[in-house]
Image (cartoon, rainbow, N blue to C red):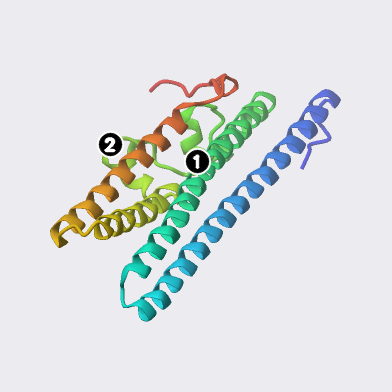
Amino acid sequence: MIDHSSPPGVATKLQILATEHWSLLATRSLTYTESLGRVSVFLAILSGAVIALALVAQADHFGPAFIAIAIFLLSVVLFTGVATIARLNQLNGDDYRWVLGMNRLRNAYLVLHPELEQHFITSPYDDLPGALRTLGIDVTAAHGLGSALHVFQTLPGMLSVIVAAVAGALGALVALAFAVAPLGVVVAGGAAFIVAVALMGLFGRRSVRRLDPSLDPQFPSPKA
């Protein structure tokens, strides 16, 4: 609610800032909707592939036809999963941008009315600690083991494990197609899983580090 007792210039600024704030909130909502939609599509494809493979396995008794069809289907699932994770990383980057934008607007609110600072539980600073505070992430847990564990709680982190499991199954099937010994099949599956997790982790880390110059902090958090 705009305080009409304020000078006209301040009231106009507050109205403009509030309009932009609502615009960013709506954009964040669209970002979350697309993220959940992408995840749902991938999980639907994965579920359909598993059901199809179960039917083929009953008909072929895990014979050569099953292996050939499984390799093809899991390759499609793997491609869909990697594309989904790549898009989720982009959407997370967009969400980070919207959060920083709202933090800058919050900073402008405090410039106009500094007495309101005690009422804000989110941050008015547009750097990483400020964004983490607005997102409700403990800054002290954003390093080391806490950060690693939090990664697997996010949508890209969770899907990375699932996609890596698909890659492991695909690697085991390829080894089985070449008549590798059972121990070799297990090793091939485990190696494919580990490699997939490592590659997607590196890809996710690079996507986080590639930030637009417009996101450079203009209102950094005060140093302790």
Above or below, 197 relative to 3: below
The structure residue drawn at horizontal position 44% and vertical position 47%, both measured from the top left corner, is 156
Which residue is nearer to you in this view: 122 or 45? 45
Q: Is residue 107 above or below residue 161?
A: above
Image position of 182 with respect to 117: above or below: below
Query: Left or right: 139 with respect to 96?
Result: left
Per the image, label 1 sits on a secondary structure element best described as: helix
Q: Residue at x 62, y 46 (%)?
A: 31
Q: Quadrant of residue 25?
A: top right
Against 222, is 122 above or below? Answer: below
- Viewport quadrant of the N terminus: top right
The x, y position of residue 133, in whole percent, is 47, 38
* Image coordinates for residue 107, horizontal then vertical, percent: 61, 27
Figure label count:
2
Foreground label between 1 and 2: 1
Residue at left 68%, top 39%?
24
Which label was assigned to residue 89? 1
Quarter in which the C terminus is drawn = top left
Front residue of this view, candidates 104 and 64: 64
- As measured in the structure, the alpha-carbon distance from the residue carrying label 1 to the one carrying label 2 is 21 Å
Type of amino acid at the residue the image marks with label 2: Gly
Binning the other alpha carbons within 10 Å of mark 2 as few (below 14), some (14 to 19) or many (20 upward) gives: few
The amino acid type of the residue labelled 1 equals: Asn
Q: Position of residue 122 (x, y in %)?
A: 54, 39
> Residue drawn at (43%, 54%), measured in percent from left and top?
75
Q: Nearer the viewer, residue 188 or 9?
A: 188
Count residues near mark 1 (Cα–Cα under 10 Å), then give few for <14, some for 14-19, many for 20+: many
Residue 146: numbered disc: none
Mark 2, residue position? 144
